[in-house]
Amino acid sequence: MKTILRGSRSLLKASSRGKRLATAMLLSVVASSAMTAQAQDSIGDLSGYTDEDFYAAEAAYESEQYSAGDLNTKSSPTEVDYAPISYSDMATVPTPMPIGSAYDGGCSPTSTVSCSAPACKPKRRKIGSLATCQASDMWTTAEFLMWFPQARTSAPLITTAPPGLAPIIGPAYPDTQVVFGGEDGLGGDLTPGFRIDAGKYLSKNFGIGGRFWFLGEDEASYSAQSDGTAFNLGRPIYDTNASQNDAILVGATDVGGNTLFAGSITAESKLEMIAGEAYGRLMFACGDEYRTDLIGGYTYFGIDDSLFIESTSVEVTPPTGDSFTFSDTFTANNDFHGGQIGFETTLSRGRWMFSTLTKVHLGNMNQQLSLQGTATETVAGTPPTVTVTDGGLLALDSQGEYERDVFAFVPEANVKLGYRFRDHVLFTAGYSFLYWSNVATAGEYVNPVFDATTRATGGPFGQPPLVWKDSSLIVQGIDLGVVIDF
């Protein structure tokens, strides 16, 4: 019992509230001891315990004196000692620390934890945590395209030379110039277009969308008239009879200044492109300032290339008045159907945004060629005699319709910088690049071989039938747009 009392005194000395609580515990112990003693008396007085022991302990307790701060030196609890806890007592209870303070290891202005500690660094969501990033419900992007299609190649189609010189291609004719056609001689200029992309997120992580774009005509043309006084004008060929380069004269003079032919020529090349996509996008990774989506879906590309050239030559010397008109038309249509897969990553900082898009389209390229030509010979007379034959000047043996299917892949890349002008409006400027691995272009199928002696008979002209060529095509350029998301 003395041990219990000494323990109670230690608690009482700790604080005023502790002393009051200890006093109450002491009384409980004393009462319990008294009841135990009474029970022992009733059941037979256990040995080693008597009333004298209890009284001696109580007297020892009452004889203890405490300092001025311990229950006001009272030796036994009074009514004051059991008074309710006051407001001042409650005010001494420590208040909870705010979240992010030193109490929970976070970073705050008064934190004692270094903000370079791992606990303070912003958490990045790892790949696979798809349920924590929220994107806009819907988006619409409209862009003005300023793209440069790759220049197309063909055989040289129109040449000029100084008066009195033959417009023939070769080392012996250094003054001859190719004014239409040749290596990278068709198109390649700035071509405007338009692109729209719209879609909707069906959940936080998955959305569907569609994209459509078209490019205007990348056109190259040439038109001229000549009687040889300013320059000689011709259509270059390879003459199978002479086994050397030659030219069909459109307008020319001889070395003496006499006009041999007077005539005109018109040529035009056009490239048109169109695309449509239907895709789904799944959030792949995200963080406080970035988001990466996995994109997959269906792609269609339509690439149409055409080439037309027509010339008329009227014989002046000798003055027969006979005329020859050659007209050739080459068209190539490419239809791509396939799938796409890629990634789009968007980085945001304040009102600024930077995004990258990389995709590859894989599928079938259906290629269709049409090569047609006519030759019209008019002999002066009353009435004139007109003879029309197939083949033109350049189609000849290759004239006809052709089609094939080949595998093609189309890598695509886009980078974009944007500024958020309003909460839901973003202005962007970017760069786009596309590459088609296999595209048929019209100029690739121009055959400059010509046999004048058999032209009117319809051939054959000693040339093999059309041979397919694997040609690539690149388009690249700047896009300016506006994004609306909500």
Image (cartoon, grey):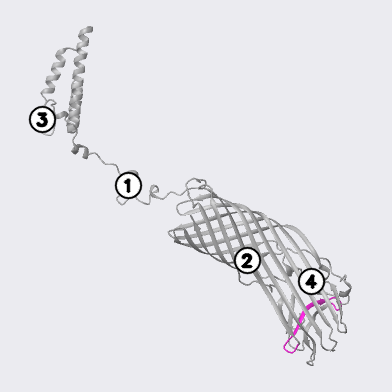
| Separation (CA) of disc 1 from disc 3 | 43 Å
Relative horizontal placement of residue 212, taking residue 369 as reference (left or right): left
Q: Which mark is residue 447?
A: 4
Disc 4: CA contacts within 10 A as few (<14), some (14-19) or many (>=20): some
Coordinates of residue 358 in the picture (x, y in percent): 58, 57
The circle drawn on residue 73 is 3
Q: What's the distance in space between the residues labelled 4 and 2, CA to CA?
A: 29 Å
Dot in front, 2 or 1: 2
Helix, strand or loop at label 2? It is strand
Mark yes or no: residue 10 visible. Answer: no
Q: Earlier in the sequence, mark 3 or mark 2?
A: 3
Q: CA distance from mark 3 to mark 4?
A: 123 Å
Q: Secondary structure at mark 1?
A: loop
Placement of the N terminus among the 4 image quadrants: top left
Q: Point out residue 343 in the picture as x, y percentages from the top left corner.
A: 56, 54
Give the mark, 4 or 2, whose residue is nearer the N terminus: 2
Q: Which residues are magenta?
A: 228-243
